[in-house]
Amino acid sequence: NNRSESARARLDGHARQPGQHCPMEVAVGGFELDRFPAGAVLSVRCGSTRRQATLETLMGVALKFPVSWEEMKEPLRVDLFKPLATERVVLNPREEVYTVGLAADWTVALSVKPSGPAAKSTPSPVEPPFERETTNAAGSAREYLEEHGILRYVQTMLHAMVRLRPPDPYDFMAKQLQS
């Protein structure tokens, strides 16, 4: 059909060197957001790699895939999902299993743990929001908080609270601490 021939012509016009491995990008656009359900998620699968995000965040964004144009063996798969339920889980470094209630009758269990020896030794990418203390007392307090994962846990909880903006933030924090 003309649309696919036109798209192929635009893609073929992209500067690619024969035999050169160049990861593929899929740009998303050309849609009217208000015509889709709120919170709709677009999912694009290329081979075994899937990239997905809400339509709001995909406007003009290129999804990157580790396969080159020449290595493509299958067509892209594009799915549109509508979230049925959403819940955020604040991870506690001392917990491995979480029960997540997604709706009245929908509950799933998640097991969260490092994926291997390298994961255990990798330093956290989240730095505490203060500089290294110079006194023994402050250094000792920081060491204690890091040893027990308190800083990361509280930062994650606060991040979730700011994103969700619950009507009663104190109740939200109490429930997170009790879970």
Image (cartoon, rainbow, N blue to C red):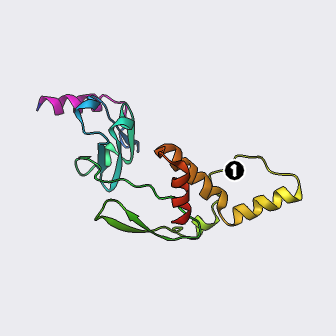
Magenta residues (range) = 2-16
| Residue name at image x 86 percent, y 59 percent | 137
| Residue name at image x 51 percent, y 71 percent | 96
Q: Is residue 165 left or right of residue 54?
A: right
What is the quadrant of the N terminus in the image? top left
Q: Is residue 48 left or right of residue 125?
A: left
Q: Which residue is mark 1?
A: 128
- Callout 1: 10 Å neighbours few (<14), some, many (20+)? few
Q: Is residue 13 left or right of residue 166?
A: left
- On screen, residue 179 above or below 34: below
| Residue name at image x 69 percent, y 50 percent | 128
| x then y, percent, for residue 138 | 83, 56
- Displayed quadrant of residue 15: top left
| x then y, percent, for residue 103 | 31, 59
| x then y, percent, for residue 66 | 40, 49
Q: Amino acid at mark 1?
A: Pro
Tell me if residue 13 is in the magenta stretch: yes
From the viewer's side, name the closer residue of 16 and 156. 156
| Residue name at image x 70 percent, y 66 percent | 147
Magenta span: helix, strand or loop, mainly?
Answer: helix
- On screen, residue 51 above or below 7: below
| x then y, percent, for residue 79 | 24, 47
User: SS of the residue at dot 1?
Assistant: loop
**Residue 22 visible in the picture:** yes
From the viewer's side, name the closer residue of 168 and 27. 168
From the viewer's side, name the closer residue of 99 and 59. 99
